[in-house]
Amino acid sequence: MARSSDLYILLFPLYWQVFTDAALSIIQTPKNLSVTKGDNVCITCSWEAEDQDERIRVWWKVYYESASAAHNGTVLASVMWINNKTEVRIRSRDQSDYQLTKDKAQLWLFSVDESDAGNYICEVIIDKPEHRSGKGKGTTLYVIDSSSSPGLAYLAMFIIIPAVILLGYFLYKRRKQEKIHLLNQRAPEAVELNEMNENVNDGEDSSSSNSVTWAISTLYESCDYFAMKIPETPEEPVYSLAT
């Protein structure tokens, strides 16, 4: 009987942890990643931390697309955070990096290739002081070999370039129509301005003609005055201006 009670005391913390495990909401981003062979990749998992959290463990797993991959996933790393100190316990990929803080974990993969394609999932366990756990919804990684997939080049050649040319043509036509519309608006103003200039020129010509007529008339009046002048003394000769 004593042994049964001792066994119950020993197993009680395990039962308590299993049946009272609080769920931890994990936000994993991005959902999908499509990169070119040789690129670097970053996957992030975040959660809501509490001030009293002291020990956090993060497991990074990947479910590869290849048929020979393990069905239960492959562990890439196990990262431990204890009182602001990070320790990587397991690392199965050389060109990788793992960062862990109190409320965020990041997985970096460098120089990826086709063999890295798969679904990546983070599992987070906070076991001190209160046990909480959760996992992300996964990030699907697609890796494209640019040397063997000229699809992007064809896309640029047959879709993007013609689209740019067509857009330029429409902009040119629109600008031309705006110029024609502007000229049509200014045409009546130009006609009115020409009429005003003609009226001014006619006025100037009429004024010049009147000035000439006035000058000739004045000249003739002066000549008539000198011709009709009577001398004051008999000795003064009399001049006559023939007209």
Image (cartoon, rainbow, N blue to C red):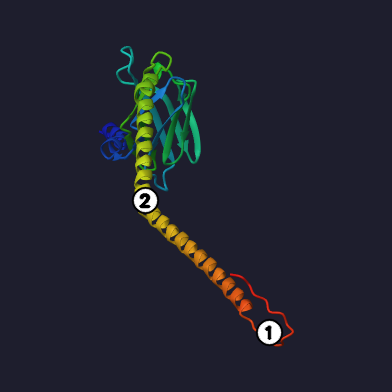
At 57% from the left and 72% from the top, the residue drawn is: 220
Amino acid on which the number 1 mark rests in the picture? Pro
Does residue 74 appear in the picture of this structure? no
Residue bearing the label numbered 1: 231
Residue 61 vs residue 201, the one in the foreground: 201
Q: Tell me, yes or no, whether the two marked residues, 1 and 2, touch with CB atoms within 8 Å.
A: no
On the rendered structure, is 52 left or right of 68?
A: right
Residue 175 vs residue 198, the one in the foreground: 198
* Image spot of residue 77 (x, y percent): 43, 25
Disc 2 residue crowd, few under 14, some 14–19, many 20+, Cα 10 Å: few
* Image spot of residue 108 (x, y percent): 46, 28
Q: Secondary structure at mark 2?
A: helix
In the picture shown, does residue 54 fall above or below 146?
Answer: below
- Where residue 114 sits, quadrant-wise, is top left
In the picture shown, does residue 144 fall above or below 239?
Answer: above
On the rendered structure, is 235 left or right of 106?
A: right
Amino acid on which the number 2 mark rests in the picture? Ala
Q: Give the distance between the C-alpha atoms of the residues marked 1 and 2, in whole angstroms.
A: 70 Å
Which label sits in the foreground, 1 or 2? 1
* Image spot of residue 139 (x, y percent): 34, 29
Extreme residue in the bottom direction: 233
Query: In which quadrant of the rendered image does the C terminus lie?
Result: bottom right
Does residue 65 appear in the picture of this structure? yes
Q: How many marks?
A: 2
Give me the disc on residue 210: none
Q: Secondary structure at mark 1?
A: loop
Residue bearing the label numbered 2: 187
At 42% from the left and 35% from the top, the residue drawn is: 105
Extreme residue in the front direction: 234
At 41% from the left and 41% from the top, the residue drawn is: 103
Disc 1 residue crowd, few under 14, some 14–19, many 20+, Cα 10 Å: few
| Sequence-earlier tag: 1 or 2 | 2
